[in-house]
Image: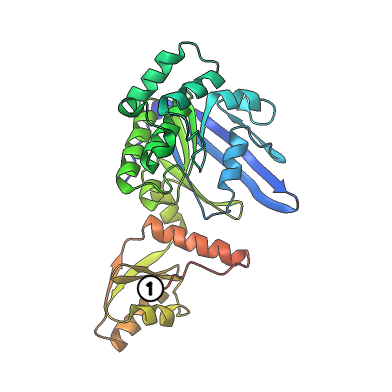
Amino acid sequence: MSAPDLPAARAGAAIDVERLNKYFGDKHVVKDVSLRVQRGEIFGFLGPNGSGKTTCIRMLCGLLTPDSGTGTCLGADIVKESYRIKREVGYMTQRFSYWDDLTIRENLDFVARLYQMPNRVAVVDQALDELGLANRSDQLAGTLSGGWKQRLALAACLLHKPQLLLLDEPTAGVDPSARRDFWEELHRLAASGISILVSTHYMDEAERCHRLAYIAYGQLLAQGTAQEVVESLGLSTWAVYGENLVELGRQLRDAPGVAQTVAFGSALHVSGLDEPTLSATLTRLAQAQPDLRIERIDTKLEHAFIYLMGRSATSEGAPAQARARS
């Protein structure tokens, strides 16, 4: 599913940072990261666990100070004016961080008190209505399912009317129906002019972003629309159908022109950077095993990110994961 076009009228960066770096002791966890997120844009932030996504988000919202680098968030300097950013940004953490022994209404009222909001009752009532929580307002947060906890967390983020949302893997552990509803809400918010940076592991969610970036081991490896990211890698991809695909994936792992083999359902997807060499390899395979069916397919975003993950792991000396076996 492709993301809707971003209206040109919303030009202007909600986030504009250059060469951010962060160390924890001698560990360099964010390395020269530069990002620009336009107003009214949904910007996807992808990468494996431990890649630096959360550290980046915390620097953007003023919870962490970068060791070097410059930039602004909603026009405020991320180093000198972090106090402003904290009050103007909505931040949704990876884990549910509200109070299990309070009701939905009590949680929202507590957050409204923290922001010293006037007309708290009216503000909370509006949030309950807009997020579909009114009928559950007296239910204890600790008894909610993952999807309803997610709605509560988003409602709390929106109470103070932020113009930027920073969402750190907000749909992890949430069922597909709740994820779909959540993303419909994000697009409604973006259409109203709110900017959103959201980290995710789900490719279908990444494809619903206006633009996205992939980060691994603290470095940004790709940025752009989903189509731009795929095209920038220059991968060509074939699907192989037949028997014994597990063994076939092992055989192809080091074959000429093969960059990765990945199981997708009943097929083995084979990608490479050198199209003529890969095509010749698969032609020889088809001649040697005529029971196989091989066809050229479009390279998808998931192929691109599996390749990026494997390349980054290899460059860091970690076990390569790109050549996933079927």
69 sits left or right of 148 in the view: right
Q: Residue at x 43, y 59 (%)?
A: 304
Q: Residue at x 34, y 83 (%)?
A: 285
Q: Secondary structure at mark 1?
A: loop
| 276 or 171, nearer to the observer | 171
Q: Quadrant of the C terminus?
A: bottom left
Q: How many marks?
A: 1
| Tag 1: amino acid | Ser
- Which residue appears farthest toward the right when viewing the image? 26
Image location of residue 64, percent across then percent down: 66, 37
Image location of residue 146, percent across then percent down: 39, 43
Q: Can you tell which quarter of the image residue 189 is in?
A: top left
Q: Can you tell which quarter of the image residue 83 is in?
A: top right
Q: Can you tell which quarter of the image residue 127 is in?
A: top left
- Which residue appears farthest toward the front when viewing the image? 101
Residue of label 1: 326
